Amino acid sequence: MAVYKRNYSAYTGTVTPVWTRVLVLARYAFEEAWSSKITVGLFIFCLLPCIVSLVVIYLGDNPIARALVGGRGDMLAIDAKFFLKVLQTQAWLALVMASWIAPRLITFDLADNALPILLSHPISRFGYVFGKFIALFTSLSLITWLPCLLLFVYQGYSSPQPWAISNLQIAMGLLAGSVIWIAFLSLLGLALSSWVKWRVVATGVIFAAVFVPAGVGAIVSAVLRTRWGLLLNLPVMMSNLWQRLLGAPAPMNDRLSVPTLAIAVMLSLTCLVCVAMLNKRIRAREVVRG
Amino acid sequence: MGVIDLDGVEVRLANRTVLNNLTGELNGQAIGLLGPNGAGKSTLINTLLGFHLPSKGNARVFGLDVHRDRAQIRGVIGYMPENDSFIGNMSGVRFVRYMAELAGLPPGVALERAHEALFYVGLGEVRYRKVNTYSLGMKQLVKLAQALAHGPKLLILDEPTNGLDPVARQRMIQLIKDIRKEGSIRLLISSHLLRDIDETCDEVLILKDGRIASLCNIEEERRSNRSFMELETVGATERFSVSIRGLGCECATFPGGRIKLVIPDNIEARDLYVIASEQGVQIRRMNQRRDSLEDIFLRAMDNDQERTANGSL
């Protein structure tokens, strides 16, 4: 084929390996997500708390600043508790980001019925979802574990005492806590987006999926006088998990504590439901029963 | 090894047998898939693409099993679905490039081929417009462009002229003919429009109620029924009819210079013109009775009905 000749010719060149097709999907999904100015605006907004934290770390390691705050030195203490707050802030901003990006990755394809064409290429349904997952996971990484670890590195660099080695658990906790959260968010976002054709509605549904069960859980806990209602409360569950991963002090109120195993089971169950939802929805052809 | 081999293929969807014991070998350069609505045409295409798993039997494309080797098959197939299927907020060229990359072309080559494919189908001037701003005809063409861009060995077109106006339809048919003429691509064209298949295909598979009603080579079928001819002549009709009897034709003359004849296989229309010229006879009209695809289709439907009736007795 040539533009000026306008005739057809067969392709005889090289073909890329099949496994790289997932990366093609991921690349296009990533470009789609970041083609919106709102995404860029959100990204900048999500980095603002990190800049504030950076300033706090600078001041915390600055003798003059510490002298100025005097007896309230714990205000500028850079420890597990400080990084827990940073992680929590970034994690909830990641929810905002995920609820904006995830629908862009899936609903466009569903709204225009692109799946038959996409899946008629050498890409499996798993490959399709995985490609989108990579794009979302990478986008969320830019505002969670990456800036958190950079803050950790900066603290290790600017601290007058050897700090990084003795606080390695914080770095591991930041990484593990962020990865668990954004992997969960990515799966949840894609699963819910695959069932809703309208992007704005999908964004709302993702938020609702996090906060409505939390309210239901609170009612269950209050009515049945049990703490197991917290297993529906994602914010509390994740706070518990992050606090343990970073080695930060436990919350004063014991009633807000949930066993780690129960949290892991609950997150795994939710992920399985998400996979089932994606399996049901991401198909080239729907078989209508009846 | 045929382009498509069907060996007792049965596909059940939602507890209903949609394709029933399809067996045959399709070898044509352009294979037409005909049948009334609900006959199983799209299901057969989806099965060939590996979207549906046959519950019995197996199907092969270029010798590859449609389920086990589906990734390989999809690499050599270009598929143009029946319904709207695209990514609306992408420009035409980006969409076609994306599909070409998914089919395995390196990014640079995919971009180049996307431009070429869009010019080839006639969308060169609108390739930077978003696909959801295209008209229905343009959307059909962009689907064709994405199916062609990676240079497939088999092009599957599911109702390619669906919803097109006569001009756009003619353009689509011409494109299909050009692709067929180029020769490197085999075509499988599904349609319920006999004329589309008649104009573009050399082999036809007719489905009815999920069964094969007929599988035939259109040209051969026509050739086997081309012996009847009607002529309208001016001049020495009687002498002319005696001469053509001498060629071995059975012949009957009628008032007004009309002649009906049955010609043997070795006689061509040209031979009649030669005799007419020698005897100063003008042939004003020549009507060679050929089986149209419609005849083939209707006969297949009738045969299938008879088979069903006999089966039920």
Image (cartoon, coloured by chain):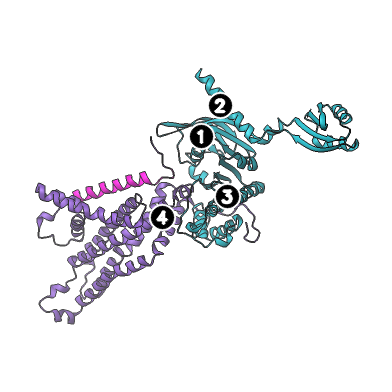
Chain colours: A purple, B cyan
The range drawn in magenta is A261-285
Tell me which amino acid carries mark 3.
Answer: Asp
- Closer to the chain start, of discs 3 and 1, is 1
Q: Helix, strand, or loop for circle 4?
A: helix
Q: Are marks 4 and 3 in contact (CB under 8 Å)?
A: no
Q: Nearer the viewer, mark 2 or mark 3?
A: 3
CA–CA distance between discs 2 and 3? 33 Å
Tell me which amino acid carries mark 4.
Answer: Phe
CA–CA distance between discs 1 and 2? 12 Å
Q: Are marks 2 and 3 in contact (CB under 8 Å)?
A: no
Q: Are marks 1 and 2 in contact (CB under 8 Å)?
A: no
Vertical position of residue A111 compared to residue B108: above or below: above
Do we see residue A259 in this rendering?
no
Q: Residue at x 62, y 56 (%)?
A: A1
Q: Chain of mark 2?
A: B
| Image location of residue B29, percent across then percent down | 63, 41
The answer to which of B163 and A275 lies nearer the viewer is B163
- Closer to the chain start, of discs 1 and 2, is 1
Q: Which mark is residue B165?
A: 3
Could you tell whether A65 is left or right of B137 in the image?
Answer: left
The answer to which of A184 and B31 lies nearer the viewer is B31
Tell me which amino acid carries mark 2.
Answer: Asp
Q: Secondary structure of the magenta portion, mostly?
A: helix
CA–CA distance between discs 3 and 1? 25 Å
Q: Helix, strand, or loop for circle 3?
A: loop
Q: Quadrant of residue A148?
A: bottom left
The residue that mark 4 highlights is: A108
The residue that mark 1 highlights is: B39
- The quarter of the rendered structure image containing the C terminus of chain A is top left
